[in-house]
Image (cartoon, grey):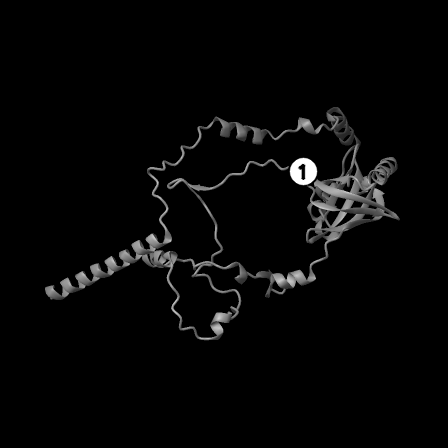
Amino acid sequence: MSQAVWTGSISFGLVNIPVKLYPATEPKDVRFHLYDRRTGKRLHYERVTRGDEPASFEPEPSLDDSEPDDRVEPRVAGDIERELAGPSPYTQGVEAEDVVRGFDLPSGDLVTVTDAELYSIAPERSRTIDIEEFVDLADIDPVFFEKSYHVGPVRGVGAEKPYALLLRAMQGAGMVGIGRFVLRTKPHLVAIRPLKEALALETLFFGDEVRSPGELTSGLVGLALSDRELKTARQLIAAMAAQWIPEKHADAYREELLGLLRSKPAARPADETLTSPASPVGDLMAALRASVEAAKRKGQKKSAGSKRAG
């Protein structure tokens, strides 16, 4: 059984049912890692800014910029490597505490907000899903369904009987309960519906999140269709009608992709004898400093040779 993502209760009227929420789906997309074929090393991503990119807003002064600092910071290996490599379009990187979120207003202005500001208005985590009303499931267009969860009773606290009561009552009525709750930090509109053996919860898109398809079908309302055309189309639908069996509809591409991956020979492990051992930072620093000094001596020799030739 998967791990519960939320523990709380369902409340309808004066009935309170302790429940747990479990993911009802398990995506099985085949995901790849990225490697450098020249070195066999895994690719990683960093927070960086481009040195040639213009600023979007006036930078905020940091605490270090408010007072002059005469201290000489020790150079680390990465600094010396960048000096030897020459100019780069990227800066040294961005620390997590220096990252702010930006939002473009409809006016075109850019505003920034900090995590502390977002936290100050974040909705409180809820422990109860209050059912506000019951509606016919057929009245909810499937486009409103976002994500599915299974709802199970909390064991050992007497939740089984009220859970079974709600399940059977909803099965008999053919209706679903509409409510709201906060999962993690996001408020959700939800539909609690009965399955054959358990309750399910569907998070729903809010009304203003679903686009109207009207602009895509303009001109179809008054389009003339003959009775013969409609009758033939209905006959075709009836001839193709079948019972919904999810197991019939497998992901053929995923199976073909997995078959391809299983048929390929495993990548040869890196030869430890050919792989240079990781040098301690101190050794790397010494090597880089020696390289810098050697480059300086080489430049001095060239300069002296040019003077003698002159």
Residue at 44 percent across and 28 percent down: it is 265
- Rendering coords of residue 114 (x, y %): 60, 63
The extreme top residue here reads 239
The extreme bottom residue here reads 67
Residue 219 visible in image: no
- Rendering coords of residue 79 (x, y %): 37, 59
Between residue 191 and residue 165, name the one nearer to us. 165
The extreme left residue here reads 309
| 41 sits to left or right of 126 | left
Between residue 63 and residue 239, name the one nearer to us. 63
Quadrant of the rendering where the N terminus is positioned: top right
> From what the image shows, is residue 255 above or below residue 179?
above
> From what the image shows, is residue 95 above or below residue 14?
below
| 223 sits to left or right of 304 | right
Tally of numbered tags: 1
Provide the residue designation for mark 1. Answer: 2
Say which element carries label 1: loop
Residue type pointed to by label 1? Ser
The extreme front residue here reads 156
Quadrant of the rendering where the C terminus is positioned: bottom left
Residue at 58 percent across and 36 percent down: it is 29
Residue at 54 percent across and 28 percent down: it is 256
Residue 234 visible in image: yes
Quadrant housing residue 191 = top right
- Rendering coords of residue 149 (x, y %): 72, 41
Mark 1, other Cα within 10 Å: few <14 / some 14–19 / many ≥20: few
